[in-house]
Image (cartoon, grey):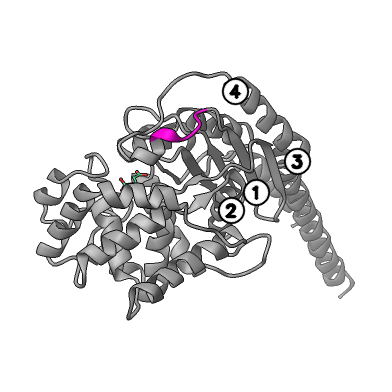
Amino acid sequence: MFQQHLRNSGAALSFVAAFTLFIGMSTATYADALSPDKIKSAISTAYDKYKDLDEGAVADYIPALARVDPKVYGIALVTVDGKVYTAGDLTTEVSIQSISKVFTMAKVMDESGTDAIHDNMGVDATGQPFNSIVAIEQYKGSEMNALVNPGAITATSMVKGKSYDEIWNKIIGYYNDFAGRKLSVLDDVYKSEAATNQRNQALAMLMYAYGHIKGDALQATDIYTRQCSVGVNAKDLAMMAATLANGGKNPVTGKQVAKTENVPEILAVMSTAGLYDDAGKWLYKTGLPAKSGVGGGIIAVSPGKFGIAVISPPVDAVGNSVRAQKAIADISNALGGNPYAVQPRYYYCTARLRVERAFF
Ligand code: GLU
C-alpha cells in the first residue's frame, strides 16, 4: 500500500517535472524567437539595409500606378497576440491590387465552402503570368487559381448578392474587418484601371464562355477592379496578414473574420501561387504563404506567429516588389518565421526518457 503510494507520487512528480521542463523549454524557444527586442532589431536592420536599394520600376500598365512615388517604403509586423512593430512610411496608401484576391477568395470560402473554389477554378499554379489567356485556354479555365486574374474575377463573381452595391459592400466590409479599420477606394486608381482593363474584361468573358462565371462577367470585372483599388498602408496589410496568421481572427479587434477551418486552404493557395511566377522561389527562401500586388505591397503569413507586410512600389519583371521581397525574407528568417524550419525533438525525447527511466 505504502509502496503503491510512493510509486504513484513518484509518477506524479516525474510527470510534473517532465511537463515543466517541456513547457519551460518550448516557451523559452518561442519567447526568444519573438521577443520584442529581436523583432525591433530584425525590422530596423532590414529597413536600413534596403533603404537605398534602387532596383525594379513602378508598374505602369495601369496609368495611375506610374505616378506612384517609388520612394515609399514601409514595414509592419503584427504578432498573433496583437503587438504591432513598424518602420518607415506607415501613412502613405498604395492600391492593394492583387493582394485583394486573397480576401475575396476567403469571402467565397466563408459563404460557399472551400470546395466551391477548388471545383470552380482550381487551386494549382498556372505557370503563366497573372493575366494569361493561354492559361485559360489550356484547360478551359478549370486549372486556374483564385490569385491570378481569371480566377480572381471568377471568385468576385461568386460573392453572393442581388445587386452591385450589395456585393461591393460585403467585399469592402470584409476587408475592413481584416484591416481593423474602414478602408476606402483610391478613386484615381479605380478610374484609371477601369478605363484600361479591356484585357481583364476579355479574361472574364472567356471564363464566362467556359461556364466558370455564371452571372454578369463585366459587372464582376468592375467590382474586381474596384477591390484592387482599395487604399492600404503597411500596417493595414500586416494586420490583414496577422488575421490569417491567427486563424482568421483579427488579433487587435478580436473579431473572428474568416472561418478558422478555411485558413489552411487560403494559406495553401497563397503558398503555391501568391508571388506570381516566382511563387516557388519565394517559398524556397522563406516557406511563407504570401501575396504580392503590382501596387508594391507584399503580405506574408507565419502561421501561429505573425503577419508581416512591406510596401515599396518598384517591382521586378514578374510584378513583385523588390524591396518587399528582400525585407520580408530577412525579417522572417531572422525570427524563425519559416513554418518548415523545425528543430529536432531529440533533446526533449532524451530528457523525457531519462525522467521516465529514473522513476518507473
Ligand atoms: N488590378 C491588377 C490587374 O488586374 C492587379 C494585378 C496585380 O496586382 O497583380 O491587372
Q: Identify the element where label 1 is drawn.
A: strand
Quadrant position of residue 3: bottom right
Quarter of the rendering occupied by the C terminus: bottom right
**Residue identified by numbered label 1:** 78
The local secondary structure at tag 2 comes to: helix
Q: CA distance from mark 2 to mark 4?
A: 24 Å
Residue 234 position by quadrant? top right
Residue 144 vs residue 320: left or right? left
Q: Secondary structure at mark 4?
A: loop
Q: Residues within 10 Å of mark 2 (few under 14, many from 20)?
A: many
* Residue at numbered disc 4: 51
Label located before the other in sequence (4 or 3): 3
Task: First in sequence, mark 1 or 3: give its number.
Answer: 3
Of residue 331 and residue 359, the one placed in the foreground of this image is 331
Specify which label sits upstream in the sequence, 2 or 4: 4
Q: Which residue is mark 3?
A: 35
**Mark 2 → mark 1, Cα distance in angstroms:** 6 Å
Relative horizontal placement of residue 62, taking residue 321 as reference (left or right): left
Where is residue 65? Give x, y as percent. 40, 38
**Is ligand 1 closer than 8 angstroms to the Cβ of mark 4?**
no
Q: Horizontal and vertical percent for residue 243?
A: 57, 58
- Say whether disc 2 or disc 3 marks the residue closer to the N-terminus: 3
Q: Position of residue 100 (x, y in %)?
A: 42, 54
The residue that mark 2 highlights is 242
Please name the amino acid that badge 2 sits on.
Ala
